[in-house]
Every structure is written in structure tokens, then in C-alpha cells.
Image (cartoon, rainbow, N blue to C red):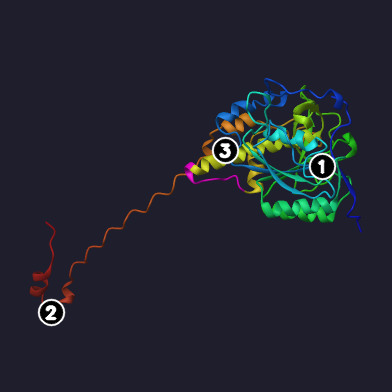
Amino acid sequence: MIDQMQIIKHIKTNLPIVCLDQIIKYEDSQIVDWGLVQNKIPETWKVTKGEGVKVMVIDTGHPVHSDIGGNVIIGDNFVEDEPHEDLNGHQTHCTGIICAKNNKFGMVGVAPEVQCISVKALNKNGSGSFNGLAKALDYAVKIKPDIVSMSLGSPTYSALIHKKIKTLYNLNIPVVCAAGNSGNGGVNYPAAFEETIAVASYNKRGGISFFSSKGEEVDWAAPGEKIYSTYLGNKYSVLSGTSMACPFLVGIIALMLSKHRLEESQTGYNDCKTISQIKEHLLKYTQDKGAKGKDNQWGYGVINTKEMILDKNPDDEFPEPPLAPKPKPEPKPEPAKVDDYDSIDEALDNLDFDD
């Protein structure tokens, strides 16, 4: 039997890209990070900024930062003897990647009008238990967000966590997870579960990050190396890891869901509601990377977000309703037959001749 108190640590690289004593101070002007620039994310905001979509982020606690304030709803806390507030910085950084506001200072997230629900399952050291994570996932089942984002993982399989993930899957709530930072060491759980979307990391040069976990479970890759985002103390930091790639992809999915809902409000039609439909749309706009087809580093590849959001493909438009059937003409009464009358003279008197 698996010990349900197995420790889970949030996933982030050990690279000291920015030491904690070198956190970037509050910026007077807004930075659009390299991942958004390369993927042309700002060009999609003329269609949607993610409005109407709710993302549950399960991590180290509620982020307190002016660049995401108003876009974050306080959820629940499943860590004993700690306040709901993020005392680690990990959730603050991940949340900024998703929904930091487009307010001309600091930085901006992929989907700057998404609402994030903060749920604490990891403590100030970035560790937690399967029991705590299971309670957080039960909370997700209760709240029913549009997407669940989890930049955390363990090399150990948990039947308890798998059961909770399956429940969310059956509710058509996509659970997006960081693949892990073990390099060739394999994909961590819960990203390794078939029912989740596992995200690898790539860098600004267009190569897969050396730390990004590899395996057949990887689904897509997103920017995850040297990512600038919100941090503790109303400051900013640059961090690397599949922890950063996960919320980036979450932001992309949020933009897609928002776009389809906006179209639904105009047409009454939405073919992007189930997990299978969501994956189908992502695959439609995926650029293959690495080995041909799905591979262990890139998964299916990288999503062309600009094309996905701006494209008005006829196949995606609301089909015209079928034409109403033409009314059938009322049948004319059949001419009287001679046999219906007693004599030919009577029949002739009752015949109806056309003009």
C-alpha cells in the first residue's frame, strides 16, 4: 500500500538564474516576456484576453501582488499551521504567467483577464502530502473551474490522486501539469497520468530545456526557461522550470476557451467544451517539433496561438440551420369515376373540368 503522506515537491529547476537576493525590483514600465513575444500573444488580445475563464492554481498559496490583484480569487487552504498566503513565491510566479494584468507596468500574463482561484496544497518549503493534494482536487470538483493548473509533482504513483484526476477528467475539466525537471529521468506524476496534459519546457533559442523531463507522456511544450514574472514582496523574478511552462500553456488554453465562448454568445454554437474537443483544437494548431510526430521531448509540439485565436476557419463557424421543408401541396380531389354513379348522364353532370 502506498503511503498517502508521500511528500510532493513543486517542480522548479535548481538553476540559480536569479538568486533570491537579486530579485528584480518593481518596474515602472511593463515588460512583455520573450515567450509572449515569440508566440505573438499580444496580437490575440484584440479577440480575447481570457475573459470569462476561471483557472484553479494549486500550489504554495494565495499570491499578494499589485500586478495580479483583482484577477485572483482566494480559494481554500489545505496546509496546516500556515496562512493561505504564498510564503514561497512559486504560486505567485506561476499565477503572474497566467493572468498578470495588462496595466502598463511590471509584466503581463498570457491571458490578462482570466480569473485565477488560489488553492494552497504546498507549504512555504514547497512540499505537501498526497492527502492535502487530494483535498485540493476534491475542492476543484466542488468549484468546477474551467482549467486546473498544477506545477507540482512526485515520482511516486498515487492511486488516490489518480482517482481524483479521473473525476475531473469525467467532468471535462482539463488538468494541466508540469512534466518535471529531471531531464532524462522521466515524467513525474500527476503529469504522467493519461488524463492530464503534461507540459515540457523550451528556451528562447527554440530548443527543449535540458532540465525538461522526457517521456511518452509529454503532450506539448511551452516557454519555461528564464521566465520573468511576479514574486514575493510585490517584486519580480526570473525563474526556470516546467513549472513556468505549465501556466503558460494554461493561459493559451484559457484564451482558446474564451474565444469559443465569445463566439457562442453570437452564434449559439461551441464545439470546444469537452476535453477531447479542447485537445482536438490544440492539435489543429500545433507546429510539430523535434522528431516527426509525437515525441518524448516536445510531445505533439508547440501551439501556434496567434493562428488559433485569430483564425476564422469555416469549419469552426456555426453551421447554417437546415432549410425548413417545403409545405406539401394539398392534393386535388380525384375526378369522379363513372362507376361512382348510376348512369353516364349523372357522371357527366358531376365531372369537374379545368379551365
Looking at numbered disc 3 in the image, what kind of residue is underneath it? Lys
Name, please, the residue furthest toward the bottom.
Answer: 342
Give the number of the mark in front: 3 or 2.
3
Q: Which residue is nearer to you in this view: 164 or 202? A: 164
Decide which of tag 1 and tag 3 comes sooner along the chain.
1
Total marks in image: 3
Find disc 1 in the rendering and name its residue. Answer: 152
Please say whether residue 271 is one of the residues in the magenta stretch. yes
Inter-mark Cα distance, 3 to 2: 77 Å
Please say whether residue 205 is one of the residues in the magenta stretch. no
What SS does tag 2 mark?
loop
Q: Residue at x 84, y 55 (%)?
A: 159
Q: Residue at x 64, y 28 (%)?
A: 41
Find disc 3 in the rendering and name its residue. Answer: 259
Which residue range is magenta in the image?
266-273
Q: Are marks 3 and 2 in contact (CB under 8 Å)?
A: no
